[in-house]
Structure formats: structure tokens, C-alpha cells
Image (cartoon, coloured by chain):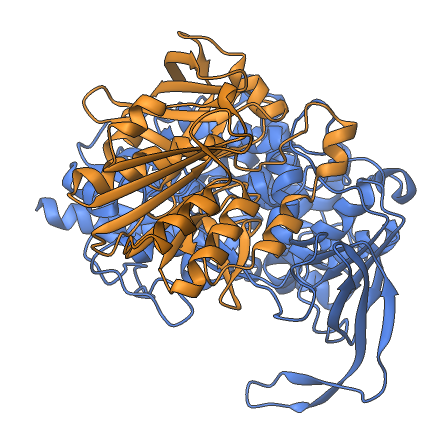
Amino acid sequence: MPNMQQNKTPVAEQEPAVRARNFAEVTKCYTPDEAVNEAERCLNCPNHPCMTGCPVSVRIPEFLSKIRERKFAEAYGIIRATNSLPAVSGRVCPQERQCESKCVRGMKGEPVAIGRLERFCADYAMNHPEEIAAAKKPEPNGHRVAIIGGGPAGLTCAGDLAAKGYEVTVYEAFHTAGGVLMYGIPEFRLPKAIVQKEIDGLKAMGVNIMTNMVVGRVISVDEIIAGGCEAVFIGSGAGLPRFMGIEGEDLVGVYSANEYLTRINLMKAYLDEYDTPIRRSKNVAVIGGGNVAMDAARSALRLGAEKVYIIYRRSMEELPARREEVHHAQEEGVEFLLLTNPKRIIGEDSVTAIECVKMELGEPDASGRRSPREVAGSNFMLEVDTVIMALGTSPNPLIGRTTKGIETDRRGCLVVNEETNQTTKEGVYAGGDAVTGAATVILAMGAGKKAAAAIDEYLKKDKR
Amino acid sequence: MYKILKRKQLNENIVLMEIEAPYIANKAKAGQFIIYRVDEYGERVPLTIADYDRVRGSITIIFQTIGGSTKKLAALNEGDSILDVVGPLGTATEYGGAKRVAVVGGGVGCAIAYPQAKALFNAGAEVDLIAGFRDKSIIILEDEMKAVCTDFHLCTDDGSAGYHGFVTNKLKELIEGGKKFDLVIAIGPVPMMKFVCKTTEPYAIKTLVSLNPIMIDGTGMCGGCRVRVGGELKYACVDGPDFDGHMVDFDELMKRNATYREQEKSHVCRITGGVRNA
């Protein structure tokens, strides 16, 4: 009999007041007993609705049944068969909009905590390497593939291709691979040691990672192909941050979320022994309502800010961040100013305040979204010394500008065939934020996976 | 790891290093830059490429020790290695077929004025190289610069060597004296570049400047290096670092470059804030 407990098995978390001042991981891992208890809530539906919600098609009911049998290493093996980075996705996927949204248990009570269970298996595997069959280096198949960008899309594509025997080289622009997992998502949500272990796992499979290689500058896609790579996957990720174009954005103390988070996460500016500086703010306004905005707001608190505001022009219902992040941010004391929009940033040299206006939602437009409009005369001032713009990014412009035959759309996103993720250039595939504009880690991973399958098809056909 | 093949102290505060970096050497062009990270704890610091040798597979950087990150770099010796060097970043300088050019360098900026003059001079342009220093004791690359220009004008603020006065005075004299420049390139401290642009503006001489904003990734991701050029938002790492100097908002750049000045005072190893030293 399944466990008919209505709610998810609770998971231990750091106390909000404590964690809001440190960078240690907020959510702890299920204990084996908790994991088994939670896995027993699964009804094992014959048609596996949960799997239809997973961009990388993890065989969810199967791994849950292995947890119930306490065969945790085997459960991990099932996840790992379709997901190259389970420790990452278990922590950062918006499960409430994916697998868990399809869970039958969610119709009455809470869905099965699939995300927490995935993370449990991944952490178990990391802590019990002796139980995990060492990743076998597959027989080389004699084909070479280049991956541009070592973020979630590129690493997933690299992992899937390496498992099929391809010789894979990842060209990474930064000094370390990981992409947004390293520079964007903070330590308290995704410890960097975990990301590094996932990357080391790929290296053990034979994936070659070249750091400090900015494709488009030091080498071009065409040169990579001329050098003997038969296919290329572009996962170059997020590019230039967006600003609002309002007065005062040039003031000292106005950051893009990319810069703020990169200083903290990649450059470790929050640790004294690291040289990169970061502003120690008192009152911070973060503009935007996505996961990046939540990460920036919660990081600001951890750097010692007294007041941190999220300013978002629509209401909580439209706010795009993962529910858990919103909940955690609220618990930690981030103040949400919803239906609010900035008008201008005020200061002499440095930011001293931000002027905002109240918004209301109008009728749904053609896209079905209710567009916000200003409430006349509702302007007000907020005293802040730092403003962080988390308004999304446009894709990295370097590759599009420097590769012949690759088309981009008017937003600068690489144009791909939706079936195969092939760009307008034969043998060159792309996925992740470079194609979609700012989106999620798991969608990038899904794209990397799809492209890996398509590259395999393409090169097999070529061989015949 | 990137090995230091040569280290030379050019003056009390300015150091030249030749670094083994074959990929970068193979692609580098005048005007482009690299970003280095000395060690695991280091900042990512941008520095303009002063020279490159495709055969030796090396690049040369010349930098002034003004803060923790450059001091850390300067402390390394020949045979030591730098943890990370990435480049060439930014776009190469576009000379637009200029035939009569004034290249103006200020202080350590001469390290970059030199390769610009060399590229132009070797391409057959007539080059006036104006090199400005505070005083005689800090002059660098004098012989090298003399060899790559038609006329060399050494200036010192105190008159201890060469022309007594600022580079802008010398430039104005040359223009007033009948030199018909079709391009001026200015590289040095932001105030110097600002005043070179003010000098050339009345004569409508196209003036390129090489900007040095705060920067982290250098690939068009962080947005830290945003500058206002002709009222538009530009990113020095992908759109620059060269810009039309008559369009640049220098005051904003100076303001933003001072972002971490307070922290620089309080934390000795956090001095440059990623500010490019060239």
C-alpha cells in the first residue's frame, strides 16, 4: 500500500534567520528513512504522467521504486541513464512546473517530492562512490565533436556523446567549466563542490575540457570544423544583460544581476581571502521576478544588507521564479514590492534612492498575459544604495558575429530546427540560452540531450 | 598555466612580461586585450596586449603596479606561471585606411600606443608619436617608440625631458603648425583621453580612444564594462575597447571606475577592482 500522507515529507532546512547571513546550502538532504517514506507516496501510475513533465525523460517511477527497496545506488543509476547532472537538476529544476505538476498525488494534497528524491540519490552516489559502478570509458567510435560552452546544455551534450564513444572537447570561455551553475546560481542553492564533482565525472568519461577558450575570438567555429571536428554544439549561454533605459542606470551602485552574481559565485567576492571586490550594501532594490532576481536578493542579504526589496511590475501570480525560491526569500526577509515599477534611479555619483510607481493589471492581451499599466500619481521613493537589474539577457553575440552561415533572429538568438536543434549551418547544433534567451537549467539540459541524439544520428548517417 | 618567458622592470612601477600563450599569439591584433587571473584567489584583470610573437607563441603585456592584483602579478619571475590568461578579447583597432596619424600615449598607455604606432607605421602611414610622462624618471620604451614613427615627440609635465608640457599642448601645436592628421589615437589615463578628444574636436579629426572600464568576464556577459557612447549603451569587451572619443561620456567612465575606491583603501589586496591598467 502506498503511503497516503497528504503532504510531502518535510526536509530539514537551515533556520531562515541563520541562513540569511551565511552562504551554506539552505535545504538539507533527505535521510534514507525520509526518502523511503516519501518514495512510498508514489502510486506507480501505469502511464507515468510525471515523466511527460521531464525535459530529460528521467524514468521517475522506476527510480522511486528502487528507493523504496533501499537500493539507492541503483536508483541513482536509473536517473543517471538519462540525466548527466542529477545533483544539479535535483536542486535547481522548477519541479512544480515539470514532473511534480503532473503527479497524480498533487490533485489531492502535495505531489511526490521528486526533486528532493532525485537530489537524495545524487548525493547518496557522491557519498558512496564505492557502490557506484565507475563510469566506463566507452570504446572510441572515431568521431570528434566540439562543444562550445561548458554550461548545463554543453555538459549534457558532452556527457551523452562521450557515453556513445565520441571524442568530445568542450571549449569553455571562463577559467572553469560549469557556466551558470558556477557563475550564476549561488552556493546556498547549489554548492560549487557539487557542480565540480559532476564535471569531474564527465572528465572521467573522457570529456576533454579546455578552459580560457573564447570561441569567436581565439578560435572560430569554422576553424574548429577545419581542425577535424565533424559536428559542433553551441551552448554559449546568456549574453549581454538588459537594462531598463531609465535615468540613473549609470550611477555607481547599479549592477546587472550577472555582474553581481558573477562576482559572488565565480569570483567568490564574499570570502575574505579572494581579491575580487563587491559592494557591501545597506538597502538593495532588485528589479525583476525570476530566479536570478531571487538569487541576487538573497545574496545581498547574505552580504549583510539590512533591507532587500524585489521590485516586480506584475503580481505574485505572474512572478516567474521557482516557488521554493520565492518562499525561501520571503522567509529570509526579502520584501516583495509587487505591481511596482522603477521610474528613475537617484544619486549624485552613487545611488541614494529609486523612484517607483504602482502598477495595475489591465485586460489580457493577445498573448493572454495581463499587461501592467501605471497608476497615475502613485509614485514613491525608496531609499537604497544598490540597484540590481535582473531583467534577463540577450544571447552572447560573439558566435553569431564570427561564424559564417549561422543565422540569428532579431533578438540575437541562434535559429535552430526544433526537431534536431541544428542551426542553419550543417553539422552545427545549438541549445540552451543561446537559442531560447534566458531560460532554465533543465531546458538547457534537455536541448543538449536532444542535440546529442541528433548529432549521433547525423554522424552515423554520414558514416554509412 | 601560462609561463612567463621574460620579465623586465621598465621603471619603478612598470613591468613588461612576455608570456607563453600560443593560441592568443596566433590571433592577437593591435587594440585587443587579455584577462589574467594570477592564482585561485586572484581577480580577473584586463590588460591590453602590448605585443605578440606568432612564431614564439608568446604575447607581451606591460602594466603598472597600482593595486593588489597587479602587484601580485609583478611579484612573479621568469619561469613562473600565471594560472589563467584568456584572449584575445575585444575588437582589433580599425584604422580606416588612415595615412597621417597622431598616436598619443600617456604614461603606461605608451605601452599600447607603441604597438598601434608600429602597426600603422609598418602599414606605410605617416605617424607622429606623442609620448607623455610625468617626469624623466618614468619614461619607458623610448627607443622602441622612436623606431616606429615618422616624428617622435617626448613630453614631460615638468620639462625634465623633451617638450615641457602636456601631450594635448604638443598635439595642438602640431595641428596648428599645419599637420593634417586624418586620425588621432589616444591611450592613457581617462582624463588625458578626454582632453585629447577636446583638443581634436574643434578640428573635426577622428579620434579613437581605448577604454578601460571595470570588467569581469570580457566576453559580453557581466555588463560591468558598459559605457555610454553617443548616448547609447555599449559594452567595451565586445563592442570596444576602442571607441570614437568624441562620442564617449568620459565623466561617467571615471565615476564608474571609482566604484571600489573605498574598498581599495580598506582591503589592500582588493585594489584594482578589475580596472584595466593600460
Q: Where does the image place residue A437, in percent across and percent down from the top left?
A: 48, 62
Residue nearest the observer in this picture, A25 or B210: B210
Residue B2 makes an appearance in the image: yes
Identify by letter the chain in blue: A
Residue B241 makes an appearance in the image: no
Q: From what the image shows, is residue B39 above or below residue B44?
A: above
Q: From what the image shows, is residue A37 above or below residue B266?
A: below
What's the residue at 70%, 22% (across, down)?
Answer: A273
Q: Where does the image place residue A377, in percent across and percent down from the top left?
A: 85, 87
Q: Where does the image place residue B111, in percent across and percent down from the top left?
A: 40, 30
Q: Residue lying farthest bottom?
A: A363
- From the viewer's perspective, tell me whether residue B149 is left or right of residue A87: left
Residue nearest the observer in this picture, A121 or A282: A282
Colour applied to chain B: orange
Q: Quadrant of residue B130?
A: top left
Q: Residue lying farthest front?
A: B177
Q: Quadrant of residue A7?
A: bottom right
- From the viewer's perspective, tell me whether residue A3 is left or right of residue A69: right
Residue nearest the observer in this picture, A215 or A237: A215
Q: Residue lying farthest left?
A: A464
Residue nearest the observer in this picture, B66 or A29: B66
Q: Quadrant of residue B158?
A: top right
What's the residue at 27%, 40% (across, down)?
Answer: A219
What's the residue at 67%, 26% (across, down)?
Answer: A274
- From the viewer's perspective, tell me whether residue B66 is left or right of residue A15: left
